[in-house]
Amino acid sequence: MAFSANLGLLWQDRALPDAIRAAGAAGFDAVECHWPFAVSTDDVNKALNETGLPMLCLNTAPGDLASGDFGLAALPGRETQARGAIDQAIAYAHQVKAAKIHVMAGKAQGDKAHRTFVGNLRYALAHAAPRGIAVLIEPLNRFDAPGYFLQTTSQAQGIIDEIGEPGLQLMFDCYHVQIMEGDITRRLRTLMPIIGHVQVASVPDRSEPDRGELDYRHVFGVLQALGYRAPIGAEYRPATTTDAGLGWLRVMGGP
């Protein structure tokens, strides 16, 4: 299996370029991040070139975290901000050759939020596709992200079917899906045609994936059997330090 280090959570004590270098030294096959926009793309590209790692994906800006924002795309009345965040993410992704952006929905509910999200996703697709960039949407569990608009894979699948564009894909984060829905094996088999990226962390503590209630050896076997060959995103909070917890990568990262 191939793995991508999510630098939104791993090596948070380092600047992004140095975190990329750490991921390369640790044996990861790719990197991904949350909100890299304060970091020069020149510095990021230098680290990517040095390590030979691709940047897989990044998130749209979340808005004002201090005031409770956690994404903007489903928030009625904030379309201008949401589309500005989409433009920013596409431009940054293009500069660092990231193939996907995750459009964060934000905390909202109801039909108006649904229509707003769909409209902003159509905008994202229209502007990302010419640059060869796909758009991801990700359900988040209601405990870590209370009030988040997108909470289940069935809701995400409905939106993907409604929009009907191949550039719109599901971010299947096993941690969030296990908490909200469970039945990971069947959901992977059913949803594989629309899955654009897979992420992992232990459940319920969201630490290294070699512990907790999910057997990732089984999950990785399912993904291999389904023909999934892209790097799997390691998006977890280290139990101690990132380096101290990397034993799982040496064990699970083999052929």
Image: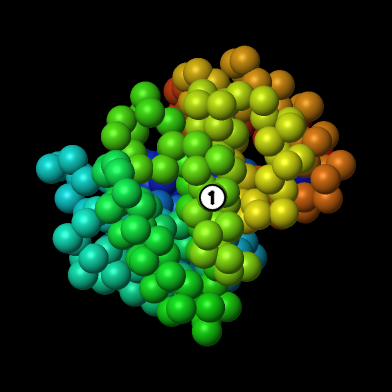
Nearer to the camera, 58 or 23 = 58
Q: Position of residue 92 (x, y in %)?
A: 40, 72
At 58% from the left and 66% from the top, the residue drawn is 164
At 59% from the left and 34% from the top, the residue drawn is 174
Query: Can residue 170 be seen at all in this image of the molecule?
Result: yes
- From the viewer's perspective, is 253 left or right of 239? right
Residue type highlighted by circle 1 = Gly
Outermost residue on the front side: it is 111
Circle 1 crowding by C-alpha within 10 Å: few under 14, some 14–19, many from 20: few
Q: Where is residue 199 in the image (x, y as percent from the top left)?
A: 58, 41
Q: Position of residue 73 (x, y in %)?
A: 31, 58
The residue that disc 1 covers is 158
How many labels, in total? 1
Q: In this view, does 244 lie above or below 31?
A: above
Q: Give the secondary structure at mark 1.
A: helix
Nearer to the camera, 223 or 45 = 223
Q: Where is residue 150 in the image (x, y as percent from the top left)?
A: 41, 43
Which quadrant of the rendered structure holds the N terminus? top right
Outermost residue on the bottom side: it is 130
Which quadrant of the rendered structure holds the C terminus? top right
- From the viewer's perspective, is 125 left or right of 28? left
- From the viewer's perspective, is 13 left or right of 252? left
Residue 61, quarter of picture: bottom left
Q: Is residue 140 above or below residue 33?
A: above
At 78% from the left and 27% from the top, the residue drawn is 218
Query: Can residue 29 be seen at all in this image of the molecule?
Result: no
Q: Is residue 74 above or below residue 66?
A: below
At 36% from the left and 66% from the top, the residue drawn is 119
Nearer to the camera, 36 or 156 = 156
